[in-house]
Image (cartoon, helix red, strand yellow):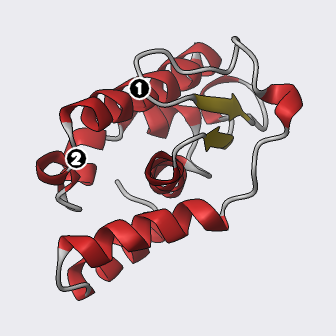
Amino acid sequence: MATAAFEDIVDTFDFLDDWEERYRHVIELGKAMEPLDAAFRVPATKVEGCASQVWLLPMIEGQGPSARFDFHGDSDAMIVRGLIAILHALYSGLSVTEVTKVDANAELARLGLDEHLSSQRSNGLRAMVGRVRKLATEVAA
């Protein structure tokens, strides 16, 4: 259950020949994101379990299981900003119920990220996915 924006990233990854180009693309995705206002870089939005500083600010439209999920995010590391952009493409615009049903591991494996990220980055990515799922679950309840 991937969004069109995520499918575009998958297609781009398929087109790029090597991981150096793919990493550059991930960094470009991060650079294209609007930075998170410093006022939202607070403990309540910080994602624990990431080696880098990561903040995710939920932007929920509506209430209950059909509420639409979105978020703004930021990091002090460019590659991590790119990973946030990929997660944004994966989840943004889905209902909170749909967010909880996304198999993030399977979707991200389509990009090969599971094989090409350091263990620290992989742990951080799992922490970000966990935070997204937790936020969506809380709203869906």
Q: Nearer the viewer, residue 98 or 120?
A: 120
Dot 1: within a 10 Å radius of its alpha carbon, few (fewer than 14), some, or many (20 or more) residues? Answer: few
Mark 2: few/some/many CA within 10 Å (<14, 14-19, 20+)? few
SS at mark 1?
A: loop
Q: Position of residue 40 (x, y in %)?
A: 81, 28
Quick one: 59 or 50, which is closer to the camera?
A: 50
Badge 2 marks a residue whose secondary structure is loop
Q: Quadrant of residue 111?
A: bottom left
Q: Is residue 69 visible?
A: no
- Position of 67 relative to 43 (above/below): below
Residue type marked 1: Ala
User: Left or right of 9: which side holds 29?
Assistant: right
Residue 40 in the figure: left or right of residue 131 = right
Query: Which residue in the rendered view is the most extreme toward the right?
Result: 39
Q: Earlier in the sequence, mark 1 or mark 2?
A: 1
Residue 6 % position (x, y):
42, 64
Identify the residue position indicated by label 2 in the image: 117
Looking at the image, residue 105 lies above or below residue 19? above
Amino acid identity at mark 2: Leu
Closer to us: 138 or 57 = 57
Position of the C terminus by quadrant? top right
**Mark 1 → mark 2, Cα distance in angstroms:** 13 Å
Q: Which residue is at a point 62% across and 20% down the rendered structure image?
A: 46
| Mark 1 vs 2: CB contact within 8 A | no
Label number found at residue 125: none
**Residue 127 in picture, x, y percent from top left:** 39, 24
Q: According to the image, label 1 marks what residue?
A: 51
Q: Eyeballing the image, is 20 above or below 44? A: below
Tell me the quarter of the picture where residue 67 sits.
Answer: top right
Could you tell me which residue is drawn at 20 percent across and 70 percent down? 19
